Image (cartoon, grey):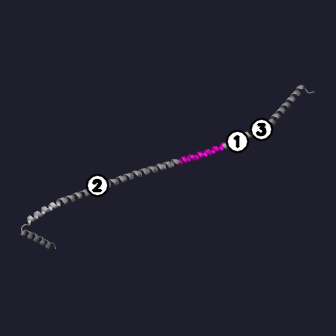
C-alpha cells in the first residue's frame, strides 16, 4: 500500500504544521499583544515627538521674534540714553555758561562796589582838606569888602538874566 517514506513525509508535514500552529498560537497568545503594544507605544512616542518638534519649532520662532523685539528695544533705549547724555552735556555746558556770566557779573558788581567805596573814602578824606583850602582861598580873595560886593552883584545879575 503506502510506502513508508510517504507516511514519514506526511507525518513530518503534519508535525511541521502542528509545530507551526503551536508556534503561531504561542506567538499570538504571548507575544502578539506585547509587540502590538510596543508598536503602538513607538507610534505614540513618534507622534508625541513630532508634536514636540513642532511646538519647539513654534517656540523657536517666538523666541526669534522676542530676540528681534529685544534687540529693537535695546537699540531704542540706547538711542534714548544717547539723547539723554547729549541733553545732559548741553545742560551742563549751559549751566557752566550761566555760572560764568554770573561770576563775571558778580565780579563787575564787586569791582563797582569797591570803586564806589574807595571813591567815598577818598571823598571823605579829601573833602575836609579841600574845604579848608577853598575857605582859605575865598577868605584871601574876598578880604576886601569891594571884592565881596562885586562877587555878590555878579551873582545877582546872572540870576536876573537867567529868569
Q: Quadrant of residue 44?
A: top right
Q: Secondary structure at mark 2?
A: helix
Q: Nearer the viewer, mark 1 or mark 2?
A: 2
Residue that badge 3 annotates: 32
Residue that badge 2 annotates: 107
Mark 1 nearby-residue class (10 Å; few <14, some 14–19, many ≥20): few
Magenta region's main secondary structure? helix
In the picture, measured across the screen, residue 65 lies left or right of residue 159, that is right
Label located before the other in sequence (1 or 3): 3
Q: Secondary structure at mark 3?
A: helix
Quadrant position of the C terminus in the picture: bottom left
C-alpha separation, residue under disc 2 versus residue under disc 3: 108 Å
Residue that badge 1 annotates: 43
Q: Secondary structure at mark 1?
A: helix
Q: Quadrant of residue 144?
A: bottom left
Please tell me which residue is depicted at 53% across the width and 47% down the height of the picture.
68
Q: In this rendered view, identify the residue nearer to me: 160 or 67.
A: 160
In the picture, measured across the screen, residue 162 lies left or right of residue 30, that is left
Label located before the other in sequence (2 or 3): 3
Query: Are the residues tagged 1 and 2 within 8 Å (C-beta)?
Result: no
C-alpha separation, residue under disc 1 versus residue under disc 2: 93 Å
Count the marks: 3
Label located before the other in sequence (1 or 2): 1
Amino acid at each position: 500500500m503506502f510506502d513508508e517514506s510517504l507516511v514519514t513525509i506526511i507525518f513530518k508535514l503534519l508535525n511541521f504544521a502542528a509545530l507551526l500552529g503551536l508556534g503561531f498560537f504561542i506567538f499570538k497568545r504571548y507575544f502578539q499583544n506585547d509587540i502590538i503594544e510596543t508598536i503602538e507605544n513607538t507610534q505614540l512616542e513618534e507622534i508625541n515627538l513630532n508634536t514636540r518638534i513642532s511646538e519647539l519649532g513654534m517656540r523657536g520662532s517666538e523666541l526669534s521674534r522676542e530676540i528681534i523685539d529685544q534687540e529693537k528695544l535695546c537699540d531704542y533705549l540706547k538711542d534714548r540714553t544717547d539723547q539723554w547724555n547729549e541733553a545732559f552735556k548741553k545742560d551742563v555746558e549751559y549751566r557752566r555758561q550761566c555760572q560764568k556770566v554770573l561770576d563775571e557779573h558778580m565780579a563787575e558788581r564787586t569791582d563797582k562796589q569797591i570803586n564806589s567805596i574807595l571813591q567815598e573814602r577818598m571823598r571823605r578824606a579829601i573833602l575836609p582838606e579841600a574845604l579848608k583850602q577853598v575857605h582859605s582861598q575865598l577868605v584871601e580873595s574876598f578880604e576886601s569888602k569891594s571884592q565881596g560886593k562885586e562877587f555878590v552883584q555878579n551873582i545877582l545879575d546872572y540870576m536876573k538874566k537867567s529868569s
